[in-house]
Amino acid sequence: EIVMTQSPATLSVSPGERATLSCRASQSVSNNLAWYQQKPGQAPRLLIYGASTRATGIPARFSGSGSGTEFTLTISSLQSEDFALYYCQQYNIWWTFGQGTKVEIK
Amino acid sequence: QVQLVQSGAEVKKPGASVKVSCLASGYTFAAYYMHWVRQAPGQGLEWMGWIDPNRGVTTYAQKFQGRVTMTRDTSITTAYMELSRLDSDDTAVYYCARGLSSVTPWAAFDIWGQGTVITVSS
């Protein structure tokens, strides 16, 4: 099983600042990597797929990069609605998720 | 609009089975793979398997093989996930999620149901 490791577990950021979230795969997943946002009591929402392609309706402040084993989600200027839990997911070999990064208000 | 609507919360006793439904609307149901994912309380996301609504073909995560059955009824654009021999570790929110690609199951999940809470307790 491919293990996805996200860091940090919690990220404290002020509104308007940039947030950088990391995701590492235990073996190469090529660019078969997605990012999701989840708020309490809600289902996950797809943000990024193919490591860097924004899903429909996702604001341009969300961007993804990386390939192979190292990936990054960047939120360029945090808005109040962006404080949430973020998961990475690989879909190269089966489907596995990271444990999540909580983005909280500093 | 494209949406997935799941059945309501259930409470089950250990050893019982549960069947969750997922009604799809706003798109061609048979054209996209349907996945099932669960999330235990305070935990991360765990993929359970997928079904091709067109052919009825399924693939399950090894952890759930022998205990999970995914089916569909194309006449009412509904997918189902049945999990048997429940125990307390199966207490979780269960989601159906549409695969992004109509060509391959190897894709991200672009549309999610609202989730169904399954509680297993004696």
Image (cartoon, coloured by chain):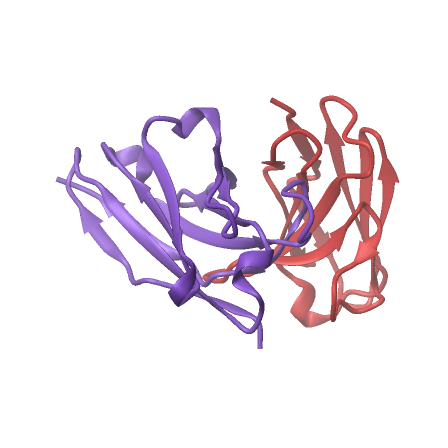
Chain colours: A red, B purple
Residue A15 in the figure: left or right of residue B67: right
Task: Indicate the position of residue B57 as horizontal and vertical percent values.
Answer: 49, 40
Query: At x 70% / y 39%, what residue is drawn?
Result: A8
The quadrant of the image that shows the N terminus of chain A is top right
Judging depth in this view, the residue of A103 and B77 nearest the camera is B77
Q: Is residue A44 visible?
A: no
Query: At x 76% / y 62%, what residue is drawn?
Result: A14
The quadrant of the image that shows the C terminus of chain A is bottom right
Task: Indicate the position of residue B34 as horizontal and vertical percent values.
Answer: 52, 51
Task: Indicate the position of residue B93 as horizontal and vertical percent values.
Answer: 39, 50
Query: At x 68% / y 37%, what residue is drawn?
Result: A90
Residue B31 in the figure: left or right of residue A55: left
Query: At x 72% / y 46%, what residue is drawn?
Result: A34
Q: Is residue A53 visible?
A: yes
Judging depth in this view, the residue of A20 and B105 nearest the camera is B105
Q: Look at the picture and state if A90 lies above or below A81.
A: above
Say how many tags the image has.
0
Q: Look at the picture and state if B118 lies above or below A96.
A: below
Task: Indicate the position of residue A74 as horizontal and vertical percent values.
Answer: 82, 53
Judging depth in this view, the residue of A78 and B14 nearest the camera is B14
Residue B84 in the figure: left or right of residue B53: left
